[in-house]
Amino acid sequence: MFIHSWRWFGPDDRVGLDQIIQTGATGVVSALHQIPVGDTWPLEEIRSRKNLIEQAGLNWVVVESVPVHEDIKKRSGQYLKYIESYKNTLIHLGQEGIKTVCYNFMPVLDWSRTNLALKHKDGSESSGFNYSLFAAMDLFILKRQGAEESYPEEVCREAEILYKSLGKGEREELQRTFLLGFPGSGEAFTLKEVLQRIEGYRGIGRSDYLSNLKLFLKEIVPVAESAGICLAIHPDDPPWPLLGLPRAVSTLQDAEEIIQSVNSPSNGLTFCTGSFGAAHSNDLPIMAEKLAHRVNFLHIRNVNRDSQFNFHEENLLTGDIDMHRILLTMILEDLKRADTLSDYTGIPVRPDHGARILGDYNESYYPGYTLYGRLKNLAEIRGLEMGIRASL
């Protein structure tokens, strides 16, 4: 069986461990967000978080994430020092028996949306991305130098019309939504700081960026192997270039190149159906079939998307992504591993984002990390999984 899991941000999370255990999850996906990016995670703090989770009757099965310092991504500054710190963190996690580490290699941004409260017909709310609205943010609020070169002329024209149609409050909300995509463990970024971070990537093209990722993997994968850890790189969200920055994990070809760069089971993927699925050009069932052997972690959510780079999160079983076919592929991979690996315990899977529904309206959650919305998604994942397994 999959390891049914739930992302928990730690003791300050509005969803408590006592609630998580009632969702049907047995695994917890967590991280030490209080540790500054680039620092080694102390063994005692890892042990303290693990003990807290186990005392609630759950298991810490995935770290999401050990952040990759921007110096590593740019291969600049103190990147060698930060790589060594990353290795030491992996060693400490391995000593505490944590087997899976999710991470991303997105430059500057962690994710991007233009709407965090998109209303659906049933009254629920989820997130969405409008490409022209994002262009309006880039062109007229962020005012990034050379931004107009990143978009077709017709998108620039539509972005200007959209921007002019927004009231002051709508422009401020768009800016707040944009800035939420920047990492920092709760730290707020200003537009000026964002521009400075983007400027740090000037002259770094996609081939350079991919080379930096491969260097990082060649350094850390052997350490992960020795520590008994499976790494799981998360795809770009959304899976296309933004803000003139390079991307590395957006397509099937990207993923294959990454896992082939260091041939090891420890060099694997987080198969995020929502992130990969946001691109109309990505065929998710085919990607699942071709990448299943290196999927170390599953993020399950659904989206509706179009060919114009617009998408929104949708109910798990009614969006554009064929969840039945993807879960069937992953279940077959799970059964194969169970037959061939003596120490196999299952692929961790978690509901990745949930709509705001029911009692979620009464609480203030980090976008996508509601209680009832994710509970619904986890129940549907478990039910679909059970039905598929019973049919085999």
Image (cartoon, helix red, strand yellow):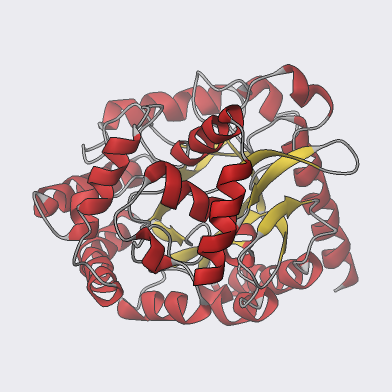
Rendering coords of residue 161 (x, y %): 60, 52
Q: Is residue 167 left or right of residue 323?
A: left
225 or 151, nearer to the observer: 151
Q: Is residue 309 above or below residue 8?
A: below
353 or 241, nearer to the observer: 241
Q: Quadrant of the N terminus?
A: bottom right
Q: Taking the image as drawn, is residue 41 in sight?
A: yes
Q: Is residue 67 left or right of residue 306?
A: left
Q: Is residue 56 above or below residue 175?
A: above
Q: Is residue 291 above or below residue 168?
A: below
Residue at point 54% right, 53% down? 160
Rendering coords of residue 5 (x, y %): 63, 43
111 or 329, nearer to the observer: 111
Residue at point 46% right, 67% down? 151
Quadrant of residue 241 within the rendered picture: bottom left
Residue at point 85% right, 52% down? 383
Q: Quadrant of the C terminus?
A: bottom right
Rendering coords of residue 308 (x, y %): 63, 69
